[in-house]
Amino acid sequence: MPSSSRAPRAPQIVNPAEKQHAPAPTQDLSSTVVTGERIPVSEYREEDLVGPYRQPEWTKFRRFPTTRVYVQPPGHVGVEWWLRPTLPRHGPAQIQNQYEIEFGLPGRFQLDLYLVRNQEGNDGPAAVDEQKIEVRWALADWDEIPWNPTLYLELTNKDSEADAIEAKLLLGDELSPGWHWGANLVFEHEMGGALENAHELTLGLSHTLEDQNLSLGGELKAALINTHADRNEFEEELLLGPSLQYRPSARMHIDVATLVGIGADSPDAQGFVVVGYEF
């Protein structure tokens, strides 16, 4: 009679090469968020470094109507409208409207194009009778050379007057957090007519009252002007006054300066209103 007992089953031998491994635990990446933290240069965001030239954000906008600083980052496009009334010691006011488009180019270059409308007196004839082209080149990235020197060349074509060429050395930097300055050394030569030469110095200083929104400061223009008839005889002009910048949005700026003339050769006053938008 068969026995009811069973022989024990031999253990199964598994080839290690065929051994099944449990799948590794997976991580759900769908909710992973990478966050960046602002590394401030100062307490002011307008002094954060931007662009390939590592320049402070405030230099992307015209800070001073009378004084340029550095260049725009490559790819930048901006447009500006200028109103510049001048009140001479004698005679009617001179009113100038200027329309500008500016391009930031690679290699620390900048190109600006202008159309200028001139008018004498409130009711006098007005015409767009002046065109300008301006090129700037910064010698190095920001803060690699003290005062960030930038070369500037402008050609002016006038319909009814002699053309002119203007060369400048642009300087600018930060004195301390919230304090910004600029200075321009200028030589302008008239290429016809009286062959007038103008040697100018402009200065601008501003203090930030509200970061990326409002700043207040002052500006100065000084000039020595002579003609070919007598290079030893100079007209001496000096204008000085307050300036303000208001940025109602991240891309828009409004600059205002009111300068008062000092000395017999200076106009009574000269004003600046600049409205710009950056793309």
Image: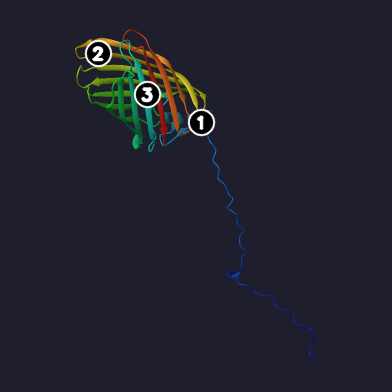
Q: Where is residue 206 in the image (x, y as percent from the top left)?
A: 46, 21
Q: Where is residue 274 in the image (x, y as percent from the top left)?
A: 40, 25
Crowdedness near tag 1: few (<14), some (14–19) or many (≥20) residues, C-alpha within 10 Å: some
Which callout, 1 or 2, points at the residue further toward the start of the chain? 1
Residue contact between numbered discs 1 and 3, judged by CB atoms under 8 Å = no
Q: Of discs 1 and 3, which sits in the foreground?
A: 3
Task: Give the residue pinned by disc 3.
Answer: 83
Task: Give the residue pinned by disc 2.
Answer: 226
Can residue 138 be seen by looking at this rendering?
Answer: no
Identify the element where label 2 is drawn: strand
Q: Of discs 3 and 2, which sits in the foreground?
A: 3
- Marks 3/2: CA distance? 27 Å
Q: In this view, does 55 lie to the left or right of 111?
A: right
Location of residue 242 by image quarter: top left
Crowdedness near tag 2: few (<14), some (14–19) or many (≥20) residues, C-alpha within 10 Å: some
Task: Give the residue pinned by disc 1.
Answer: 45
Under mark 3, the amino acid is Leu
Which callout, 1 or 3, points at the residue further toward the start of the chain? 1
- Marks 1/3: CA distance? 29 Å
Considering every residue shown, the one lying at the far top of the view is 264
Which callout, 3 or 2, points at the residue further toward the start of the chain? 3
Can residue 214 be seen by looking at this rendering?
Answer: yes
Location of residue 194 by image quarter: top left
Q: Nearer the viewer, residue 187 or 84?
A: 84
Under mark 2, the amino acid is Asn
Crowdedness near tag 3: few (<14), some (14–19) or many (≥20) residues, C-alpha within 10 Å: some
Q: Quadrant of the C terminus?
A: top left
Q: Nearer the viewer, residue 157 or 16?
A: 157
Q: Where is residue 213 in the image (x, y as percent from the top left)?
A: 50, 27
Q: In which quarter of the image is the N terminus?
A: bottom right
